Amino acid sequence: MGFFRVVEILPPLFPASRDKGDHIDIEQKIERFLEEARSIREHADLVLVADVKDPRMLKFSTLQAAAMIKDRLRMDAAPVIVARDFSRLQLLSTVLTGLSLDLPYMMLAWGDDYPRNARSTNVRDFGTLEDAIQEAALIGTRARAATKLVAPVNLTSLATPRGLSTARGRLRAGAEYLLAQPPTTDPETFVAHASMLERADLKEKVLLNVFPFRDAADLKNCESYFGWRLPKRLHRAASEGGGTLFELESDVIRSLRSGGFPGVYLNTRGIPGVAEALLK
């Protein structure tokens, strides 16, 4: 396989609360979602349908959204399946349903804890994400279907024996690739992340993440929301404008291509044109 491009998009979203009598045009939302996927056809080998943890928003199931992409657009798509939201039987039946819908690619993620004000609780019916991946892969084997599972990896954890063991365990359990966070934001961060993967012997199995930031305020918001600690030099670059951030992200993708890395994991953040701009 060449340079594998995983491009993440959002599923159709709806406000959880609205005024009585407000009308939501579901078909229009679906068509807009499919058009977003269609617009990145030439730039994505796999469309990843993100899970949204915002309690203010309702969403189509990621499985249903990915199935629409596969059925209507004939593109490979993967739903994000979050263990926090499923019991063991629910998760495994979701995997089996995905396989029946011709969705061999799926991403299994552990999921963050719900905030207290969400009035939701985490299921956590698996001991670890590795357990969930292993059972999902087993379902595929029993169904005689070729599952192509992906899972997340926290790059910062790879510097510790426990973190490295967790990453390798997810691969042994059946994950084909690990999708990295926090993002690789600039050439210096790329060198650090690349060296980390080389030392861990994970270069061929981890897709580094490129996350398009808009400006300095957006950097701060993302740090707060995702719990990232982004380099000070990136904040300085952001003060020069979004164009500077875009050039840094482009540099990272060029380095991934020229450095023999297996691919890239790009989040469009709801703006499909990002994929064309960065992956052309």
Image (tube, rainbow, N blue to C red):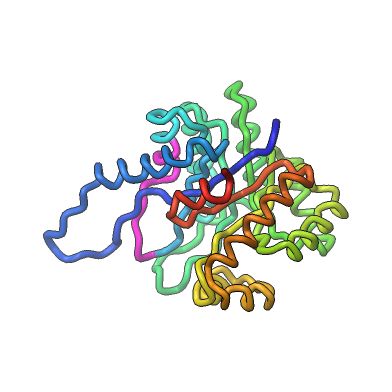
Q: Answer yes or no: is residue 128 visible.
A: no
Image: 140 above or below 157? above
Q: Position of residue 28 (x, y in %)?
A: 25, 45
Apparent side of residue 26 relative to residue 48 in the rendered image (left or right) = left
Q: Position of residue 30 (x, y in %)?
A: 31, 43
Tell me the quarter of the image containing the C terminus.
Answer: top right
Comparing 78 with 183, the one in front is 183
Q: Residue furthest left?
A: 21
Q: Verify whether residue 59 appears in magenta.
A: yes
Apparent side of residue 129 relative to residue 72 in the rendered image (left or right) = right
Tell me the quarter of the image containing the N terminus.
Answer: top right
Apparent side of residue 263 relative to residue 20 in the rendered image (left or right) = right
Which residue is located at x 63 percent, y 55 percent?
250
Which residue is located at x 76 percent, y 45 percent?
258
Q: Answer yes or no: is residue 57 visible.
A: yes
Which residue is located at x 85 percent, y 48 percent?
201
Which residue is located at x 79 percent, y 60 percent?
191
Comparing 229 with 277, the one in front is 277
Q: Which stretch appears magenta? A: 55-66
